[in-house]
Amino acid sequence: MSLLRVSWRNLWRNRRRTAITMTAIALNTLILITTYSLMGGFLKQTVRNVTQLATGEAQLHAPGYLSDRSLYKRIAYPRTVLQALGEHSIGAAPRTYGYGLVSRETKSAGALFQGVEPAMETAAFELAGHLAQGTFLAPAAHKGLVLGRKLAKSLNAEVGSEIVVLVQAADGSLGNDLFTVVGILGAVGEAIDRNAAMMHLDDFRQLFAMPEGIHEIAVNTRGRIPLDALVETLSRLAPGDEVRTWRRLLPTFSDMIELSGVSMSIFGAVFLIAAGLGIMNTMLMATYERAREFGLQKALGATPWRIVRDVTFEAWLLACVATMFGTLAGLAASYVLQTTGLNTASLAEETTISGVVFDPVWRADPTLRTVVGPVLMMWAVCVLAALYPAAMSARLDPVKSM
Amino acid sequence: MNAGPCNAARLITVVVLFLALGISAGPDVYPVLAEELSARDILNKVDDLYRGTSSQGKMTMEVVTEHWKRTLSLEFRSRGKDRSLIRILAPLKEKGTATLRSGSDLWNYLPKVNRVIKLPSSMLSASWMGSHFTNDDLVKGSRFAEDYDFRISFQGMRDGQDVVELTCIPKPQAPVVWGKVEVVVRRSDYLPVATRYYDEGLRLARTMAFTNYRELSGRLLPTVMTLVPRDKPGEKTQIVYEEIRFDVVLSDDVFSLRNLQQ
């Protein structure tokens, strides 16, 4: 194709200039792809930490439960709801909550007790695989306790430690019993780290004199069902209950994710503008040098549109070659960041933002969006930047320019 | 999932609170005559009504909440204003459960598991949400005459009773959570009739009513105390003194962790 060949030749009329511009664009592409892949991976990992570990994508509660977490606001027909969720292959875990005291020898602390069905919890969530020590709760009630790591630390508790538990039961009596620590959780989030004491649902029922009902059904489809559709399904399956997505359960965290998207866009815009100015300069110089040529073309009958097309195509070709190298380099960098990760542990031992613990090792997650996105944007910017020199060339008066 | 104040400690708090508030009465703290007393004297009498050398006795505590109602039979012993031991006699399920207050420390003995646990200090300084009492009642032990500015705000007949009402506003630095407290006493003997607690917005938060004035061990006492929280309609905590003896000799051993476990 002659346009391609002509453009290609034109590009290399000034090798050094073109090479420098290409390098700049390639570097910009490399940076954008790598940063987007890394940020994308980090956010995905963080959202995953939050939703897949324990919070879930959505939760069901009795109306008003979240405002006061009263022991008495319970989901009326949990079995029916759980069964319906099971039929829709939606992973779900029933939970009960109650405040109380945990004590070991001379240490004691307040705790948020959580009654869970270990089998369902393990099937729907990944908390069981997130232990720093020991094992998760066994499928049958056994007076075992899994503690949040900070709670365990404040009690000096280890796996095997005996813990005295004291609560005010649902009938007003003092519920108390001896439990044994079977596991200690890794970093999950401030609330769980500091307060959580998980036990088998049956142990919870006995301790709190609460023979029936649950406080929460946490739902996790592992991203299979979009949030909106999930909310719709849940509202239909459990008409009497309140449905909350993780975005509403963790509004600060959700806002932070949104905000990081905005800041990434600003970051990207700065790089794109820099690249655009580079290419505009190159094309201005290139067209200025070729004023006579364009004048001749016009004198020979070339339409202004044709000249605009030639110039912008040239700019696109330049961007195309440059982004190709940039993409290769970006993919390579992302691959390294994906496999070995970027360890930020040396910067801060642990990053907690609005109660969510962030993994210190950031791993890139190059996707179609984080790779093709920057390339397409770079192309668009290059073509746009070339429009000005292209228009200048197209408007040349053949007589004057020759 | 915030770690709210611990509801589990509600009962313990209630139990110990009453211990701190109502059980110990020392010698010579009751005005024997209806003499004219200054506002300061009246408040000191009311404060000292519940503070003394030592006491021992039995009481019944009834707690009514929206969700449950229960009655506990309790045995108590106290010495000074910061040592007390209280043990549940009934119901059977909790029989033997005991609470020891020694200074600012609180310990609980749980017979079912045969263990003693200490109430964490973080909970000592917190107020119990949802409870009929605040932890401030328990530990601070503020005195009306010292920690409040006060004045007599009413004198005369009210509800068929000749009473004196004192309005107490906490001093700026006072370790008090209330915005205002009203103390109502009978003019005849300056025994308390009611105490009304207002929050910092000066809204009524709770009322403590003193009734059934009866002679126990030769002393005239309001033998029933009823605490009604304003924000939980229908809920209340009521204490009825069954028997009480004053000036009993109680050694340090009584208030030891060893004795707690028996």
Image (spheres, helix red, strand yellow):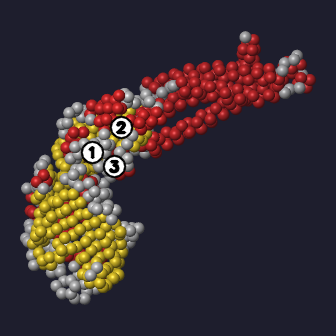
Tell us which disc is closer to us: 1 or 2.
2
Report the residue marked by disc 3: A69
Q: Is residue A124 above or below residue A61?
A: above
Q: Chain of mark 1?
A: A
Report the residue marked by disc 1: A113
Q: Is residue B9 above or below residue A314?
A: below
Q: Which mark is residue B152?
A: none
Q: Is residue A49 visible?
A: no
Judged from this view, the residue extending furthest toward the right is A399
Which residue is at a point 39% across and 70% down the rendered structure image? B202
Residue nearest the viewer, comparing A108 with B68: B68
Do callouts 3 and 2 mark residues in contact (Cβ within 8 Å)?
no
Q: Going from the N terminus, do you reach mark 3 or mark 1 first?
A: 3
Residue nearest the viewer, comparing B15 with A314: B15
Is residue A320 rendered to the left or right of residue A94? right
Q: Residue A331: horizontal and vertical position, in percent?
A: 53, 22
Q: Is residue A235 above or below residue B200?
A: above
Which residue is at a point 75% across and 26% down the rendered structure image? A283
Locate residue A291: give its quadrant.
top right
Q: Measure the alpha-carbon separation of dots 3 and 1.
A: 12 Å
The local crowd at label 3, few if under 14, some if 14 to 19, many if 20 or more residues have their Cα within 10 Å, is some
Q: Which mark is residue A218?
A: 2
Which amino acid is tagged 1?
A: Phe
The local crowd at label 2, few if under 14, some if 14 to 19, many if 20 or more residues have their Cα within 10 Å, is many
Q: Going from the N terminus, do you reach mark 1 or mark 2 first?
A: 1
The local crowd at label 1, few if under 14, some if 14 to 19, many if 20 or more residues have their Cα within 10 Å, is many
Q: Going from the N terminus, do you reach mark 3 or mark 2 first?
A: 3
Which amino acid is tagged 3?
A: Arg
Q: Are marks 3 and 1 on the same chain?
A: yes
